[in-house]
Image (tube, grey):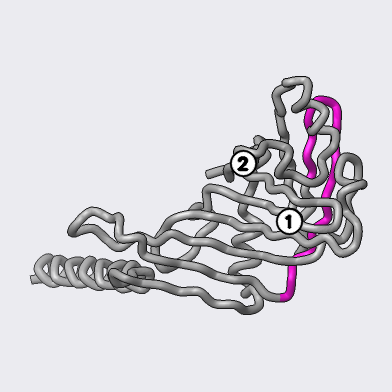
């Protein structure tokens, strides 16, 4: 009799645990056709997520078919382009006290951007309808930040004059709940009187 009661008790615990896990999982589930775009102050959870996001160290300069003719600024790299020297961009990023310190180096040249976080951010999540039939709906996600560059040093010094704005985007995939592991790529765009270019790359898993 005691063994039977113990078996029933263990079985009940398993059922309760399974139900709890199922409820937690469903809290992150979304229905097909899901779409969200919203603007607001970053939550404490989102700030913690941003602290966990890390760049993988390699960067790329976005170039259209026009090449450097479509870029304003980065004159040091323009000269390298003219001599057919490949751009080997190394990126170091830190997020501290609600600001990004973004350092780029290449071929002995280095510069740092200081990017204070804006008061509000944009959250974008959408079902791209590309999941397999019978599987959970997956979302494409973006965290978007548009603010003013506080300062630029080194190779950014001539480019950053007031007002120069930045547009930083973290891109990824996942379910309805956010995690730093969801975000796999980044893009940083500068726009100002002497700057018009974009850098992009991957994030560490």
Q: Is residue 181 left or right of residue 191?
A: left
Q: Is residue 55 above or below residue 171?
A: above
Q: In x, y percent, where is residue 116?
A: 79, 64
Q: Which residues are magenta?
A: 103-119
Front-most of 68 and 168? 68
Q: In x, y percent, where is residue 196?
A: 76, 51
Front-most of 183 and 171? 171
Q: Residue shown at 85%/31% (left/top)?
A: 109
Q: Secondary structure at mark 1?
A: strand
Q: Is residue 55 magenta?
A: no
Are there few (<14), some (14-19), or many (20+) residues within 10 Å of tag 1? Answer: some
Marks 2 & 1, CB-CB < 8 Å contact? no
Location of the N terminus (image quadrant): bottom left
Which SS does the magenta portion mostly show? strand
User: Dividing the picture into quarters, in which one does residue 139 lie?
Assistant: bottom left
Q: Residue shown at 49%/54% (left/top)?
A: 172
Q: In x, y percent, where is residue 44?
A: 64, 72
Q: CA distance from mark 2 to mark 1?
A: 30 Å
Q: Is residue 130 left or right of residue 125?
A: left
User: Dividing the picture into quarters, in which one does residue 71 lie?
Assistant: top right
Front-most of 30 and 186? 186
- Pointer 2 or 1: first along the chain: 2
For label 2, the residue is 64
For label 1, the residue is 95
Q: Residue shown at 69%/60% (left/top)?
A: 167
Q: Nearer the viewer, mark 2 or mark 1?
A: 2
Q: Is residue 73 above or below residue 40?
A: above
Q: In x, y percent, where is residue 198?
A: 69, 48
Q: Is residue 107 magenta?
A: yes
Q: Is residue 30 above or below residue 109?
A: below
């Amino acid at each position: 009799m005691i063994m039977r009661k113990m078996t029933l008790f263990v079985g009940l615990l398993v059922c309760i645990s399974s139900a709890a896990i199922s409820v937690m999982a469903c809290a992150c589930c979304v229905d097909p056709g899901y779409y969200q775009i919203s603007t607001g102050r970053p939550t404490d959870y989102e700030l913690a997520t941003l602290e966990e996001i890390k760049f993988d160290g390699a960067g790329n300069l976005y170039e259209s078919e026009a090449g450097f003719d479509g870029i304003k600024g980065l004159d040091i790299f323009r000269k390298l382009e003219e001599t057919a020297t490949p751009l080997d961009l190394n990126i170091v990023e830190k997020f501290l006290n609600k600001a990004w310190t973004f350092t780029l180096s290449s071929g002995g040249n280095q510069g740092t951007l200081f990017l204070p976080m804006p008061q509000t951010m944009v959250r974008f999540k959408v079902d791209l309808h590309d999941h397999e039939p019978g599987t959970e709906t997956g979302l494409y996600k973006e965290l978007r930040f548009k603010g003013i560059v506080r300062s630029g040093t080194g190779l950014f010094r001539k480019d950053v004059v007031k007002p120069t704005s930045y547009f930083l985007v973290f891109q990824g995939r996942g379910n309805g709940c956010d995690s730093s592991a969801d975000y796999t790529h980044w893009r940083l765009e500068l726009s100002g009187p002497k700057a018009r270019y974009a850098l992009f790359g991957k994030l560490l898993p």
